Image (cartoon, rainbow, N blue to C red):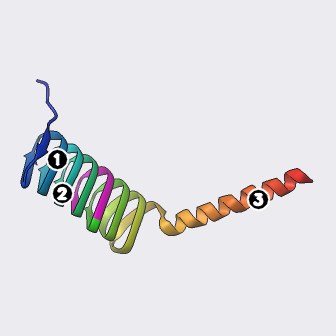
Amino acid sequence: MAHEEHDVEAPAVTIRQGIARRVTAQDVAIRQGGALQITGGTVRLSQGGIGIAMAEKATLEQAAAQAVIARDTAVLDQAAAGVVLARQAQVRQSAIGILVANEVKGDGLRVLISVRSAFAFGAGLGFAAALLRLLRRR
């Protein structure tokens, strides 16, 4: 049986064991399902996956996302995300590739690249490039 992907726009959207291409709503809840793109006020994803979520507040529980952009808070509980941008990140037992947040709370957080480490990496790379140029001139 083939599954169809749909674009959904409504004040509130709940998806259980289903998928959608784009979801736009003030309140979005997805359980055991997924979406490519979600735009909403409050987004809750449990045991599913999303491409990108743009919201005021985004909560992922036992879920995965390529990118989470939250104006206020991003909450990840036993979740994984490629990129998280938020004013505040509350994270428990989760992995994030790149995290950019004003405030981070939680435990069991694994971040591949934080803002601080990205700056340090960039500075180190710049220093190494400058050093190589100097050595080549000699």
Q: Nearer the viewer, mark 2 or mark 3?
A: 2
The local crowd at label 2, few if under 14, some if 14 to 19, many if 20 or more residues have their Cα within 10 Å, is many
Determine which quarter of the picture holds residue 94.
bottom left
Look at the image and tell me in which quarter the N terminus lies. Answer: top left
Q: Which residue is found at the position 33% from the left and 71% from the top?
A: 87
**What is the x, y in percent for residue 71?**
28, 67
| Left or right of 134 in this view: 19 | left
Q: Which residue is found at the position 33% from the left and 66% from the top?
A: 86
Residue 130, numbered circle:
3
Q: How many marks?
A: 3
| Left or right of 4 in this view: 80 | right
Point out the residue furthest to the right here.
138
Residue placed under numbered mark 2 in the picture: 40
Residue placed under numbered mark 1 in the picture: 23
Tag 3: amino acid: Ala
Tag 1: amino acid: Val
Q: Are discs 2 and 1 less than 8 Å apart at CB?
A: yes
Q: Is residue 100 in the magenta section?
A: no
Which comes before the other along the chain, label 2 or label 3? Answer: 2
Q: Which residue is found at the position 12% from the left and 43% from the top?
A: 8
**What is the x, y in percent for residue 68?**
31, 57
Q: Which residues are magenta?
A: 58-70
